[in-house]
Image (cartoon, rainbow, N blue to C red):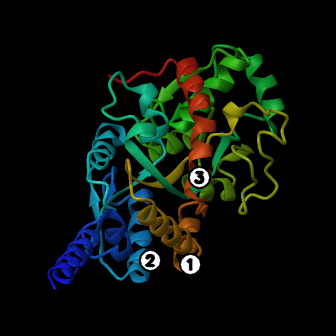
Amino acid sequence: MKWKMFAAIAAMAAMAAMAFSPVARAEAYPAKPITFVVPVPPGGGMDAIARALAEAMSKRMGQPIIVDNRPGAGGMIGTQFVARAAPDGYTILLTPSGSILTAPFLYAKVPYDPKRDLTFISQICTGQLVLAVNPQKVPAKTVKEFIAWAQQRKGNVTYGSYGVGSAGHLMSAYLNQANRLEMTHAPYKGESPMVQDLIGGQLDWAIGTAGVMGPYLQSGRLRALAVMGDRRLVDLPNVATMSESGYTDPEYRPIGWAAMLGPANLPPAILARLEQEARAAVQTTELKARFQLYGMYGMGTTSAAFRRDFDTMLPVMERLVRLSGAKIE
């Protein structure tokens, strides 16, 4: 009788231990609301995409998903917050690529190591960048014609960027230096004022997002010479990529993406669930429409594919930052 009582008590203890184990918690996940930390201010494209993704995933996961904007320091404030959060799947980062891909090289002090302190879940979507010129000032129709034109005007060509260290700035600086064009860089606090000055003739050329430049490219107020990255734009099917134009350097490939990450050591079952639901949400009609509105397209990568792409692009971004000379204290 004593042996049976002991066995029953042991079994109950084992069941209690399992109820509080990481595996059991993962199987019950999510049991409460999830927070998406977005390291940019409310109102922009990244914020809108995060909210649309939160709504789509909330429906599928059966729990509310709250969007918590924590902007500042180039995305580092929100990213650090998630890096220091408990790895329980309830605090998740929705971020542009800059906070993990360029910040480590742009800033003197970064309070986290993306490889060590974060779990890679999925790349959600990506945007195309376009090399565009003012058609009244620049007669070139191709990248090769543009470089030949610029070489004849060394020291008298200006290009803009939507921020020091942005992907547009880094690729523009690389094109400038690789071809020894001696151009002048004009940084702006945002893309809209840069595009307006490009249209107005204060700038000769710039690399910007398809979402912002698109209407002006369609109307002819700007001329697109090439698309950065690996694929042509649906809305600009006749504009070649940089690779198709004969410029195959990996430094012309970087494009901005929005991605989902969690704290380091996220339990495998929770990682798998978040990856699965994020990838499914990307395929919904609502998300596809939102991506198109901002000149982006869905990715929905696996965690492993995300990590491989990150590892491939990290040394490329390091070279681009170093060559540009960009530094932010």
Quadrant (top left, top right, bottom left, bottom right) of the N terminus: bottom left
Residue at 75 percent across and 30 percent down: it is 249
Residue 236 at x, y percent in the picture: 74, 58
- The answer to whether 15 is drawn above or below residue 69 in the figure is below
Residue at 65 percent across and 50 percent down: it is 221
Identify the image quadrant of residue 232: bottom right
Judged from this view, the residue extending furthest toward the bottom is 1
Regarding mark 3 in the picture, which secondary structure is present there? Answer: helix
Q: Amino acid at mark 1?
A: Thr
In the foreground, 69 or 130: 69
Classify residue 289 as left or right of residue 59.
Answer: right
Residue at 38 percent across and 78 percent down: it is 58
Circle on res. 176: none
- Report the mark closest to the observer, 1 or 3: 3
Q: Amino acid at mark 3?
A: Ala
Q: How far separated are the C-alphas under marks 1 and 3?
A: 22 Å
Identify the image quadrant of residue 153: top right
In primary-sequence order, the first of circles 2 and 3 is 2
Tell me if I can see residue 255 in this picture: no
Q: How far separated are the C-alphas under marks 2 and 3?
A: 23 Å
- Report the mark closest to the observer, 2 or 3: 3
Are dots 1 and 2 in contact, CB under 8 Å?
yes
Q: Amino acid at mark 2?
A: Ala
Circle on res. 304: 3
How many neighbours does mark 1 have within 10 angstroms: few (below 14), some (14-19), or many (20 or more)? few
Regarding mark 2 in the picture, which secondary structure is present there? Answer: helix
Are dots 1 and 3 in contact, CB under 8 Å?
no
Q: How far separated are the C-alphas under marks 1 and 2?
A: 8 Å
Circle on res. 56: 2
Tell me if I can see residue 192 in this picture: yes
Circle on res. 284: 1
Classify residue 265 as left or right of residue 101.
Answer: left
